[in-house]
Amino acid sequence: MQQEDNSRRTFLNRLLSGGVVALLGAIFYPVYRFLMPPKTVEANVSQIKVPFTREEIASDPKKAKNFKFGRSLGIIILTETGDLKALAATCTHLDCTVQHRPDLGIIWCSCHNGRYDLNGKNISGPPPRPLEKYVVNEIGEDIFVSKEEA
């Protein structure tokens, strides 16, 4: 009789433990899936057409516009000489977004006062590297930006 009670008790303990494990899995697995997004592969972007024209850039008070280049952000600037320059708009220090300061003639990162010249070279502040340069091509009214060949 004692042997039968032990096996029944063992069976019920295992059944209850399995139910508790299944319940915890049903609660925490969806939370885990929500917090850990699926890995997606994005196409490697080498050239884009920016969604604005030279006139729209010239009419902007900062003479610059931001654009998406794949998953990163870029900035296109109309210089005093009338040239269009495109650079990555992500600071190389802590990935803050940079902005054009035409009053100072620089590209400025407001996070830690990082400064770049209009060619993307870091000139002061904490940024360790220059901004990535892009090549700008104008075809009619369209502006195309592509990665600079290494």
Image (cartoon, rainbow, N blue to C red):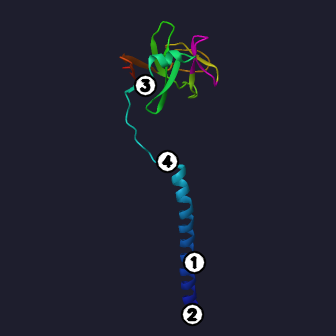
Amino acid beneath label 4: Pro
What whole-number distance in Å separates the C-alpha atoms at marks 1 and 3? 65 Å
Residues at circles 3 and 4 in contact by the CB criterion of under 8 Å: no
Closer-to-camera residue (38/102) = 102
Residue beneath disc 1: 13
Q: Could you say where residue 150 lies in the image, as x and y percent from the top left?
A: 37, 20
Please give the name of the residue rendered at 38% of the width and 30% of the height, measured from the top-left corner: 45
First of labels 2, 4 by sequence position = 2
- Label 3, residues with CA under 10 Å away: few <14, some 14-19, many ≥20: some
- Label 1, residues with CA under 10 Å away: few <14, some 14-19, many ≥20: few
Q: Could you say where residue 88 lies in the image, as x and y percent from the top left?
A: 49, 23
On the image, which quarter does residue 15 sit in?
Answer: bottom right
Q: Is residue 58 visible?
A: yes
First of labels 1, 3 by sequence position = 1
- Element at label 1: helix
Question: Of tags 3 and 2, which is closer to the observer?
Answer: 3
Residues at circles 4 and 1 in contact by the CB criterion of under 8 Å: no
The tag on residue 25 is none
Q: Is residue 147 visible?
A: no
**First to last magenta residue range:** 99-111
What whole-number distance in Å separates the C-alpha atoms at marks 2 and 4? 54 Å
What whole-number distance in Å separates the C-alpha atoms at marks 3 and 4? 29 Å
Residue beneath disc 3: 50
- Element at label 3: loop
The tag on residue 37 is 4
Q: Judge whether residue 105 is colored magenta.
A: yes
Query: Left or right: 115 with respect to 144?
Result: right
